[in-house]
Amino acid sequence: MNILQALFFPPEQPGGVSSMIPYIQDRFQQMGWQMELFSLPKRVRGKGQEEVVFETFDYHAFEGDPLVDKYIQTYRDYVWWTKLRLKKTYDIIHAHHPIAALVMKQLYPDTPVMMTIHSSYERELILNGKIEENGKVHQFLTAIYGELEARVDKLLTVSESFRTYISPYVKEAADIKVIPNGFDEKRFKPIAHENEVPQLITVCRLVPAKGIDILLHGCAELKRRGHPFVLHIIGDGPIRPELEQLAVELDLYDDIIFYGYMLHPEEFMPFFDIFVLPSRAEAFGSVFAEAALCWLALVGTNVGGISEQIDDGVNGLLVPTEDPIALAEALEKLVTDSSYRYNLARSGWDKAKQVYSLQRVIAQLKKVYVNTLRQAE
């Protein structure tokens, strides 16, 4: 079987999708399946000229907004690049971005195309203060879910909570299959270590949706309670200067290290003790599973895919969003009790290895591919 994995970002980009797909490709190739990766390079901008047509709505009603116009131009660019680069046929195309899915179905109408919806672009834009809820761009982006349902052969997503999130925008949410992300446990090597001062780590893009401002306020409260720690922040983004200034204002700057972007943080992560990320929304939250496989204790917010990964008090701790005091109290439990921290981390590792193994994903995808191809015959 010859399968194309159609991405949006190149596979070397950070994030759950990009870090997972090359490992999926490797496993399938080991089984004798042919699998290629395809994505739109960042240098390809403003090349496409073809008109875009959606079946379920008229996007022209949303034209004039810079984000909508950029989305449509990116669609055109993906069409242009795909026509330029792909000259062969495939048995199945598995897309990981709405533009990739819709373009592939347009250009390969007789090939089964499936799409895994990994996250909510519109929700991220709202939380990052870029668009208004129920505004023009929000309506456009949520209409894309219905377009995907109408045109692609199979929809998948990464968590039950995200399937619930998109259910108002599709006709048959029950038909969307949930396959959580999976990780090659060989990439993660827990290291026995003893840190005299608890080491906290977070890994994310520095945008408002990730709640790092809440993390800093929570850490300030932890410091006021007299608990020493070091917080390591791996990642970059537009609000980094604001966060650095907030760290100064909260008298935290000497307790925090800002690293910027790092391609393979999992190589660094096992030396720390606690992974913490108070996201305001997460479709899945791959970094929690990655941290668990590094044998770190987990602290996250009770939202989306995070709450599906963490059983509060069993393999990590859950706190409400926008609550730095609750976050500080959760961290306090872990920094003051190394045995409790160890037990949570061990349980987290056990669950991640059992539930989020790459082998499980391979088995589920193989079944979906075979069934999809059989239905198309």
Image: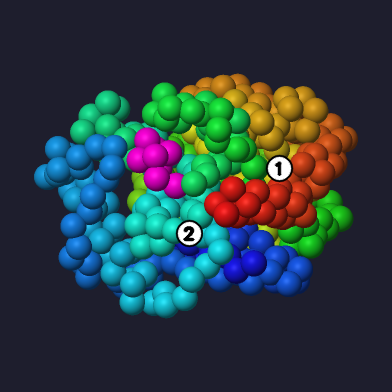
Q: Which residue is mark 2?
A: 111
The quarter of the picture where residue 149 lies is top left
In magenta, the rendered stretch is: 145-152
Viewer-side residue, 238 vs 68: 68
Viewer-side residue, 301 vs 286: 286
Q: Amino acid under label 2?
A: Thr
Determine if the magenta segment contains residue 150. Answer: yes
Mark sitting earlier along the chain (2/1): 2
Determine if the magenta segment contains residue 324. Answer: no
Q: Secondary structure at mark 2?
A: loop
Quadrant of the snapshot with the N terminus: bottom right
Residue 308 is labelled as none
The quarter of the picture where residue 107 lies is bottom left
Q: Is 295 placed left or right of 227 in the picture? A: right
Residue found 35% across the figure and 57% down from its top: 106
Q: Is residue 297 above or below residue 295?
A: above
Q: Are marks 2 and 1 in contact (CB under 8 Å)?
A: no
On the image, the x and y values in percent for residue 239 come to: 37, 47
On the image, the x and y values in percent for residue 163 come to: 53, 31
In three-dimensional space, the C-alpha distance between marks 2 and 1, rounded to whole angstroms, equals 46 Å
Q: Which residue is mark 1?
A: 274
Residue found 51% across the figure and 29% down from its top: 173
Viewer-side residue, 282 vs 72: 72
* Circle 1 residues within 10 Å: few <14, some 14–19, many ≥20: many
Viewer-side residue, 84 vs 262: 84
Q: Amino acid under label 1?
A: Ile
| Tally of marks | 2
Kindly tell me whether residue 228 is visible in this rendering. Answer: yes
> Magenta-highlighted stretch: main secondary structure?
helix
Q: Is residue 141 above or below residue 203?
A: above
* Circle 2 residues within 10 Å: few <14, some 14–19, many ≥20: some
Residue found 18% across the figure and 65% down from its top: 49
